[in-house]
């Protein structure tokens, strides 16, 4: 018992002195629908470039700005940082309009670039990592019906918020606020990271190149899918923390697909160098009815 107590004291002192000198870095994880994927040329309400949606994005950004991040990271791979830097420089110097870019509807530009410019940040950093795959490759095995039924339930409950947005009855601010409610984050996390482990003794259906099937154990086929998603999240986490260390940032804003939020929260929650700041502290809270959970945009399979 004395040894264990001494060990705990040493670990505590090491944590205090080695990992979190001073105050921990505040980090806010902002879950987003992928705005460019929402776009339907036949429906102006799905276009973030319209005057109405731009005003709503301005409202969203004004709320997030109160967090005062000194580092903004987005879902772009580090290998594309040079391109991201040059594009951001043009944007900051008013030499580029996002509407003129092929992918200018993306949240990394519409939210990340716009907020970064307002805050006078020198760059927006890409922290994404390859490794995602489609949830649909898990389609067979023992207990597969449990996994499929939860997915069906989510799809059946998904139409309300999406329809409201598509009909112009819901603002983008309200939509993204809804996505970031803890109840929604938990539902997304459960379907993506918890439920698959119940599926065993199966095989992946049409896996893509991101899945190394040579190391997949059919006995744990569902857990194998979760490990693919989690592996990517740890790489994203690594990119975030190494960027923060290099820049010595005090407040980090992560703009990323909503499917990652629950997983990244669990990782950062165990890192004493960081303090999670709920996005709802700035976006506000909304009542979440179980009959109105959005799925097809929130659960972007590669988001």
Image (spheres, rainbow, N blue to C red):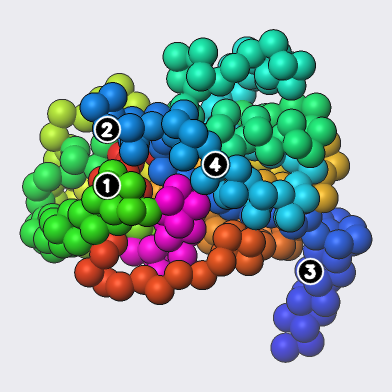
- Tell me the residue at 28%/24% (across/down): 41
Q: Which residue is mark 2?
A: 43
Q: Give the magenta range.
A: 171-187
Q: Which residue is mark 1?
A: 167
Q: Is residue 172 magenta?
A: yes
**Judging from the image, what secondary structure is the residue with disc 2 in?**
loop
Specify whether 276 is left or right of 51: right
Of all residues shown, which one is farthest toward the front?
51
The image shows residue 283 at horizontal and vertical percentages of 58, 60
Placement of the N terminus among the 4 image quadrants: bottom right
**Judging from the image, what secondary structure is the residue with disc 4 in?**
helix
Tell me the number on the disc at residue 55.
Answer: 4
Q: Which residue is mark 3?
A: 11
Query: Is tag 3's residue or tag 4's residue first in the polypeptide sequence?
Result: 3
> Is 154 situated above or below 215?
below
Q: CA distance from mark 3 to mark 2?
A: 57 Å
Placement of the C terminus among the 4 image quadrants: top left
The label nearer to you, 3 versus 4, is 4
Residue situated in front as seen by the camera: 104 or 156: 104
The image shows residue 253 at horizontal and vertical percentages of 67, 46
The image shows residue 130 at horizontal and vertical percentages of 46, 28
Q: Residues within 10 Å of mark 4 (few under 14, many from 20)?
A: some
Q: Residues within 10 Å of mark 1 (few under 14, many from 20)?
A: few
Query: Is tag 1's residue or tag 2's residue first in the polypeptide sequence?
Result: 2
Residue 64 in sight: yes
Q: CA distance from mark 3 to mark 1?
A: 55 Å
**Callout 3 touching callout 2 (CB < 8 Å):** no
Query: Is tag 3's residue or tag 2's residue first in the polypeptide sequence?
Result: 3
Q: CA distance from mark 4 to mark 2?
A: 18 Å
């Amino acid at each position: 018992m004395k040894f264990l107590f001494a060990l705990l004291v040493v670990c505590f002192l090491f944590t205090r002195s080695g990992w979190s000198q001073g105050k921990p870095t505040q980090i806010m994880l902002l879950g987003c629908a992928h705005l460019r994927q929402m776009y339907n040329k036949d429906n102006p309400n799905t276009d973030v470039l319209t005057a109405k949606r731009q005003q709503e994005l301005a409202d969203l950004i004004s709320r997030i700005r109160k967090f005062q991040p000194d580092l903004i990271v987005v879902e772009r791979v580090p290998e594309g940082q040079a391109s991201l830097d040059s594009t951001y420089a043009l944007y900051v110097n008013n030499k580029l309009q996002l509407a003129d870019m092929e992918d200018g509807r993306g949240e990394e530009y519409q939210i990340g670039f716009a907020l970064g410019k307002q805050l006078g940040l020198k760059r927006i950093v890409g922290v994404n990592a390859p490794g995602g795959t489609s949830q649909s490759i898990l389609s067979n095995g023992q207990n597969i019906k449990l996994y499929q039924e939860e997915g069906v339930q989510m799809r059946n409950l998904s139409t309300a918020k999406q329809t409201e947005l598509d009909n112009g009855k819901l603002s983008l601010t309200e939509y993204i606020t809804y996505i970031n409610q803890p109840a929604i984050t938990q539902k997304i996390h459960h379907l993506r990271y918890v439920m698959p482990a119940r599926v065993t003794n199966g095989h992946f259906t049409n896996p893509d190149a991101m899945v190394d099937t040579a190391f997949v154990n059919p006995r744990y086929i569902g857990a194998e899918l979760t490990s693919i998603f989690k592996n990517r999240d740890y790489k994203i986490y690594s990119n975030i923390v190494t960027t923060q260390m290099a820049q010595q940032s005090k407040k980090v804003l992560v703009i990323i697909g909503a499917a990652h939020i629950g997983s990244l929260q669990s990782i950062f929650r165990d890192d004493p160098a960081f303090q999670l700041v709920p996005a709802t502290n700035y976006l506000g809270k909304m009542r979440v009815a179980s009959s109105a959970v959005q799925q097809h945009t929130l659960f972007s399979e590669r988001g």
